[in-house]
């Protein structure tokens, strides 16, 4: 069995380290695509995981496109090798819409496969992939006037991947909230937001209905002083090991249901902490398209 892992631009080394630490045998690397023997393992740094890859012969452009169409309709190409030939095959495949998403919306559910040309006469294809987006890349119709910064895109993407988001009547805690991109998104969805940061919120965000700012350290905050919350969000700049202790404190309190937290890495990637987050029952740890040297931890109470 063969599995291929595609990293986002600039993060193939992190993915390779993660796979090697997990004992996966990387047999080939083509720029951002790492091909491994064996079944898929969870890999946070993969923008897309290609499950159960098959090698298919390419006798001609037409027969290659036909072979893919015979498997299913929708295919995304990643072509670090034999780019021109791959493009000719892709042009013969049905068009896959990649329209920017208007938030809020759930990620598409239609199967989307991935393929690449490993040699002029041989392709590698996977009908089933981990990301609902071509090569894990998602774009949005942006909100250029409301949020005070671009951090909101990361939260939009996390909620699109969760296929759920807070709404009216729900209570959110936004840790490390300043200047307020995430708080803006949550308040716009109609949720109540307790925004915690020693730095203030942008005044326009602070004035939104349902927003309460607490100028404290998130680490000193006792869950009992906040009470029950439907969602805990964190975008705090801190070491992932410290964030893990904070998340464990809130999980132990039983007061928080869903979690969306950014793990931020300074210098070397702390793979141990990332693995500890991934080991939390029900957790997903993803490198989102809008993440930099960061991962996003998702814990969905409904999953
Ligand atoms: C990347 S910014 C957050 C951006 C925010 N999510 C947004 O959308 O505007 C990180 C924030 O973490 C805050 N921070 C750092 N240490 C903190 C702590 N101990 N408690 C609360 N916030 C903290 C910083 O003040 C900073 O505003």
Image: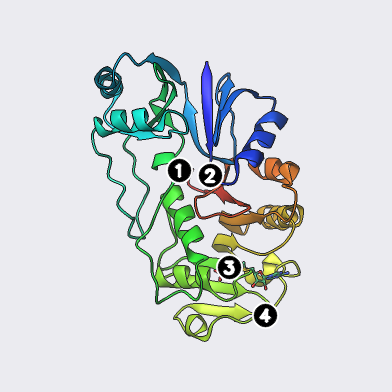
N-term mark: 4 or 1: 1
Q: Are marks 3 and 1 in contact (CB under 8 Å)?
A: no
Mark 3–mark 2 Cα distance, whole angstroms, equals 27 Å
CB within 8 Å, label 2 to label 1: yes
Q: Nearer the viewer, mark 2 or mark 1?
A: 2
In 3D space, how far apart are the residues under numbered discs 2 and 1 (Cα atoms)?
8 Å
Q: Which mark is residue 215?
A: 4
> Does label 3 or label 1 sit earlier along the sequence?
1
Q: Residues within 10 Å of mark 3 (few under 14, many from 20)?
A: many
Q: Depth-wise, is mark 4 or mark 2 nearer the camera?
A: 2
Task: Give the secondary structure at mark 2.
Answer: loop
Q: Do callouts 3 and 4 mark residues in contact (Cβ within 8 Å)?
A: no
**Residue highlighted by disc 1:** 136
- Given residues 281 and 71, the one toward you in this image is 71
Q: CA distance from mark 3 to mark 4?
A: 12 Å
Indicate the position of residue 63 as horizontal and vertical percent values: 26, 17
Please provide percent x and percent y for residue 38: 58, 18
From this viewpoint, is residue 132 visible?
no
Residue 10 lies, with reference to residue 32, above or below; the image says below
Q: Nearer the viewer, mark 4 or mark 1?
A: 1
Question: Rounded to the nearest whole Å, what is the CA distance between mark 4 and mark 2?
Answer: 36 Å
User: Which quarter is ligand 1 in?
Assistant: bottom right
Q: Secondary structure at mark 4?
A: loop
């Amino acid at each position: 069995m063969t599995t291929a892992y595609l990293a986002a631009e600039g993060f193939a080394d992190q993915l390779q380290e993660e796979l090697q630490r997990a004992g996966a045998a990387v047999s080939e690397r083509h720029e951002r695509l790492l091909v491994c023997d064996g079944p898929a393992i969870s890999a946070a740094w993969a923008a897309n995981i290609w499950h159960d890859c098959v090698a298919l012969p390419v006798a001609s452009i037409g027969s290659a496109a036909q072979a893919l169409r015979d498997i299913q309709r929708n295919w995304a190409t990643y072509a670090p090798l034999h780019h021109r030939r791959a493009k000719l095959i892709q042009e013969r495949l049905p068009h896959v819409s990649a329209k920017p998403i208007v938030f809020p919306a759930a990620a598409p559910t239609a199967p989307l496969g991935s393929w690449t040309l490993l040699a002029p006469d041989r392709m590698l294809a996977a009908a089933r992939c981990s990301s609902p987006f071509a090569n894990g890349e998602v774009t949005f119709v942006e909100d250029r006037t409301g949020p005070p910064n671009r951090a909101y895109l990361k939260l939009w993407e996390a909620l699109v991947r969760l296929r759920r988001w807070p709404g009216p009547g729900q209570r959110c805690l936004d840790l490390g909230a300043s200047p307020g991109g995430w708080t803006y998104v949550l308040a716009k969805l109609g949720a109540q937001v307790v925004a915690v940061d020693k730095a203030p919120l942008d005044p326009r965000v602070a004035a939104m209905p349902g927003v309460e700012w607490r100028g404290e350290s998130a680490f000193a905050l006792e869950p009992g002083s906040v009470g029950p919350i439907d969602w805990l969000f964190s975008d705090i700049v801190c070491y992932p090991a410290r964030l893990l202790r904070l998340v464990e404190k809130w999980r132990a309190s039983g007061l928080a249901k869903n979690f969306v937290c950014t793990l931020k890495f300074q210098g070397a990637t702390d793979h141990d902490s990332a693995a500890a987050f991934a080991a939390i029952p029900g957790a997903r740890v993803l490198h989102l398209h809008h993440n930099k040297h960061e991962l996003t931890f998702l814990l969905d109470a409904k999953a």
